[in-house]
Amino acid sequence: MNIPFLSPSRCVLLITDEMVHVYDVGASSVRLVNSVSWMDPDFEDVVTDNIVKDCKGKPVLILSDMVEQHYRMEKMPKVSPLDKANIIKRKLAVAFPKYPIRAAFPINVKEKKKGASGGVYLLAAVPETKSFRKIVAVVKRSLVPIVGLCLLPIESSDMVKTLSQKLKKKGKAKPARWSIFLAQHQSGELRQIVVNDGNLALTRITPIVDTDKKPELWASEVNQELNATMGYLSRFGYSQEDGLDVIVIARPETANRLEALLEVPCDFHALTLQQASHVLGVKLGSQDGSRADALHTAWIGRKSSFLLPMQSSDISHVRLPRQVAAGAMLVMLAGAGWLSFDASQKVQMLNHTRDSLVTAQNEQRNLEQVYKEEKERKNVRGIDDVDLFQNALSLYDDIENDGFDPLPVLTAFANELAGVMKVEAVKMGVKVQSTSGSELDPYYVEKKQKIFDSTFQFMFPGTIRVEEGNLQMRNLTKRMILALPDYDVTLQKELQDLTYSGEFEFETGLISEKSSEDQYTAEIRIRKKTDDSNSGN
Amino acid sequence: MIQILGTKRVLFLTVLLLLNVGLGLALYVHLIPEQEKVTSELRRTEKAVAQKKEEIARIKEEIAMLRENLKKYKILQDSGFFGNQNRVTAQDAFQEIREESGVLKAKYFIKAAERIEHKKAEEVEHVLLSSAINVDVEALDDIDIYHFIKLIQKRFPGNVELTALDVRLGSRVNDASLRKIANGEPVSMVKGHLEFNWRTMPPENKLGFDVFTE
C-alpha cells in the first residue's frame, strides 16, 4: 500500500497502439490530461506541452499497454552472483534478438528439485517501434526527468494479487491460486491479466464492443474472451482445485449480466472503479465511467520501485544524465543550504566575537588608564622598588629584637632599691637556642628561642647581721617578682645560707669584731624566655 | 548535453555550482580564518585584561602597604640600614655618642663583617651584613653607660642590637678619688663591657671588598 503524502507525483504516459494518454498522477488524484493519437501532426508539440505545462514538468513514466509485448519464462543455470547478470543478459539476447528493449525479473515458481537451478525468470521485451521513438523524442524535448519504461500487465500483476487477497471470501480456507482481472481501457480494448501465485502468468488485450450501453452484448463479448483465456490457462497448468478469482471492473448491471453468463467455476467479483480503488487503498479522485486505465495508472504511477523496469539505450541516454543532474542539483541545493546555514552561524559568531573583542579592548584601555593612574599614585610616594621596600621591612622585622633591652629590668631595680641598697655589678646577656624536634616529623617546624639572662650582685658590709641582710634580699626579690611579672626572678645567692644545706663557720669567745671592710655578697637572677619564629632564612 | 538537460537546467546547475563555490570560499577562505583571527585576538586581549587587573590589584596592595610602612621605611633609609658598614662612619658615630653620653672612655673593637644568607635580601639583590662590636667603657656613673647604650641603638647607622652587658663598680670612693672629683678631674668609678650586633642591608653591587670577609 502506498502512503498518499509520500507517493511520488508523476506524469504517466500510457502508450497504446492507437494513442498516448497523458495522466497527471498526484498524491490524491489521477487526472487524464489528454489523449493524443500517434497520427496527430502536432503530436510532439501537444504531448510536450501536456508534460511541461499541464503536468508541470513532473518526472515522466512511460507505461506500455501495447499489444506487442513478449514474455517468456526461463530457467537460469546455477551460477555465481557475479556471473548472473551476464547470463541473464545473454538469455535475453538469445530469447529476443530483434527487440532491444527488454528486461528480466525472478518469479516464485515451485521447482521439482529445489536449488537445482539459478531460479526462474520472466523475460520481457517490446519492439522499438516508430511510436516508441516518437515518445522518446517527446520526453527528450520536454527536458523533464524520466523515471523509466514499464509494462502495464507486469506492474499491475501485484495489484491483481492484492485485490484477490483483499476480496477473499470470509470462511474460505485458502486463497485461490489463480486470478483473472478483466477491465476495459480508454482505447476500448479489454485487458486481461492472469496471475498465478502472485506472478504474471498470461495477459491478453483484445478488442470488444466499444461501449457497455448494451449490457447483454458487452457481457457476451467479455464472457467469450474469458472463455478463450480459460482455454489458454489449461496449457499453463490450471486445474479447478487450484481455485480461481475473476475480478471485473464494470458497472453493476453489466457485471450482473456477465455473472449470469459465466460457465467457468470461480469466485466472481464485480467492482466499480471507485470500489476497486477503495479496496486497493489508492485515491483516484473523481472518475467517470468504468475504464480501468486510471486505476492502473494510479497503482503504477505511485510506485516507488518497479517490478520490471525495461532497459532501453534511448531512454538510458536521456534518463541517466537527467538523473545525475537532478542528483547534482539536490546535492548542490543541500550543500548551498548547509553552507548558507553554516556561514550565517559563523557570521553571527564572528559578530559576537567582534563585539566581545571591542568590549575587551575598551576594558583593556580603561584598565590601562587605571593602571597608569595607580602607578603615578604609587610613584608620588617616592618608592621605585616595592620589592626592596617590602623585603627590607620584613627582614628588619626578622632581625629586630635579636638582642635585648636592659631598660625594663634596670628601671624596676631603680624603683625597688629606693636608695637603700646598692648594686655592685650587673651582668646581662642573651642567647638564641633552637627548639629540639625530630627531623623525621614532617610537621616539625624549627623555632628559635631567645633566652634573656641577667645577674644583679649586691654588696653588704661585714657588720650587718646575716639574718637581716638575707631578709632584705628576700624582700627585694619578692618586690622584683611583682614588678617584673613576665620575668623569672630568683634569689640566687643569699648573704649566707643559714639552713641545713649551707656551710656555716662561726667563732665564739675571744674573737675580734667584724670590720666594716669585710663584706657579704648576694645575687638575684632574672631570666626571660621568648619564642622567636621570625627566622627569615 | 545541453540538448538532453536543457539550457535552463544547465544554467541552474551552473548557478548552483557557483553559489556553492562562492559560499565555500566565503566560509573557508574568509569567515573561518577571520573567526580564528578575531578569537585569537580576543583571547590575547582577555588575557591582557586579566593580567592588567592583577597588576592593578597588586599595585593597590602595594600602595596600601606603602601607605602603612612608608614612615618606617624612611626611618630605615635615614638610619643607614642600606649602608655598607663603612668603619670610618662607625668611628665618627662612636666618638659623637661617647661625648654626648658622658662616658669617660670607650674602647671598641669591630670584628670583620659576615655575610648572612637571607632569602629576602637575596631576592632584591641585597646582602645582609653582620658585624660583632665589643666595647669596653669606663664612666663616673653607671647611668652614663646606660645612656651610651641608648644612643648607640638610636644613632648608630643600621640595626644595632645589644647582646651582652657587664657593668661593675671599678673602685671604692676614697680620699684620693674625692679630691680628684673636687679638682674636676675625670675619675672612672664604673667599668663595663658591652657587646653589640651591627647589621645593615647594602645592595650587592655596592659592596666594597674591604668591609667584609666571607
Image (cartoon, grey):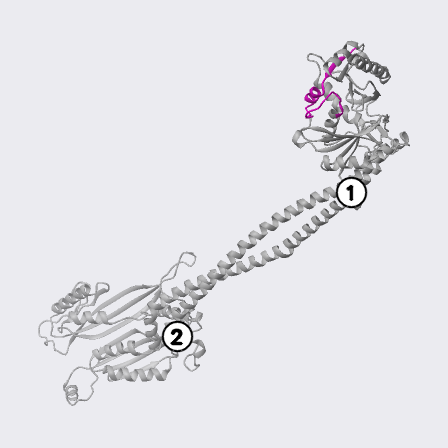
First to last magenta residue range: A265-293
Towards the viewer: B1 or A368:
B1
| Quadrant in which residue A429 is drawn | bottom left
Q: Is residue A109 visible?
A: no
In this rendering, the count of numbered labels is 2
Is A379 magenta? The answer is: no
Instruction: Say which residue appears at 53% left-offset and 58% top-offset.
Output: B43
Q: Position of residue A85 (x, y in %)?
A: 83, 34
Quarter-wise, where is residue A434 in the image? Answer: bottom left
Left or right: where A287 falls relative to A357: right
Label disc, if present, on residue A321 of the rendered structure: 1
- For the residues bearing labels 2 and 1, Cβ distance under 8 angstroms: no
Q: Looking at the image, can residue A187 be seen?
A: yes
Q: Report in which chain the residue with disc 1 lies.
A: A
Image check: A524 left or right of A249? left
- Chain to which the residue tagged by mark 2 belongs: B
Is B112 on the left or on the right of A52, as rendered?
Answer: left
Report helix, strand or loop for mark 2: loop
B44 versus A52 height, above or below: below
Determine the residue positioned at 89% across, 29% down: A95
Q: Which residue is mark 2?
A: B201
The mark found on residue A342 in the picture is none
Quadrant that contains the N terminus of chain A: top right
Q: Label 1 amino acid?
A: Pro
